[in-house]
Image (cartoon, grey):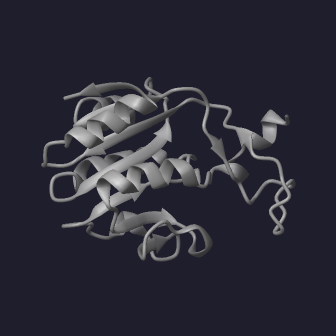
Amino acid sequence: MNKEKLLSSKSNEWETPKDLFEKLNKEWNFTLDPSCRDYNATCLKYYTMETDGLSKSWEGETAFCNPPYGQELGRWIKKCSEEGEHATVVMLVPSRTDTKAMQEYCLNKAKAVCFVKGRLKFINRLFPSWREDGNFKVSPAPFPSLLAVFGTENLTEGQIKLLNSLGHTMIN
């Protein structure tokens, strides 16, 4: 595995594993994907890098956000936390709990934080191994993952049960 490529700014987009999204969507019924590309949007309503989900209001939406994992990640964590004041947001990010954004906006403000068991297997279309025909290797991420839930509504029993099945979960 070429860690230089995995950790470079050229590979900061990690497509949400389909099976994970389907499980989460069953419990949350997402209406917005604020951070995707046209080819990997998880919801009918979505924003791409060009339409800039960071600059839009997500009010009234139930958003699933798997943002780019590069230098702008802190801005996305802050945005998800802020949007949680008038929307429901489930965010998938690397579990880098030592960062300022994670400490300030996620761990203290999220309704729930789930430390996902194991390493998720992502698709990254920017890797040289990507092939349109689907004949490519999907490898575990070189980092642990975390799900954070922001919003004003209480979590349902089903949502809590799902998060607990995915990993160690803290409910605030």
- The answer to which of 26 and 132 lies nearer the viewer is 26
- The answer to which of 148 and 83 lies nearer the viewer is 148
- The answer to which of 91 and 70 lies nearer the viewer is 91
Quarter holding the C terminus is: top left
Residue at point 85% right, 58% down?
Answer: 135
Quarter holding the N terminus is: top right
Residue 77's x, y, as percent? 37, 45
Q: Measured along the vertical axis of the image, is residue 151 above or below residue 103?
A: below
The answer to whether residue 43 of the structure is visible from this angle is: yes
Residue at point 25% right, 45% down?
Answer: 150
The answer to whether residue 72 of the structure is visible from this angle is: no
Residue 76's x, y, as percent? 40, 51
Q: Quadrant of residue 4?
A: top right
Q: Quadrant of residue 168?
A: top left
- The answer to which of 68 and 165 lies nearer the viewer is 165
Q: Quick check: 153 left or right of 72?
A: left
Q: Quadrant of residue 133?
A: bottom right
Residue 28's x, y, as percent? 30, 55
Residue at point 58% right, 50% down?
Answer: 17
Q: Measured along the vertical axis of the image, is residue 140 above or below residue 69?
A: above
Q: How many numbered tags mark residues here?
A: 0
Q: Quick check: 23 left or right of 150?
A: right
Q: Measured along the vertical axis of the image, is residue 113 above or below residue 73?
A: above
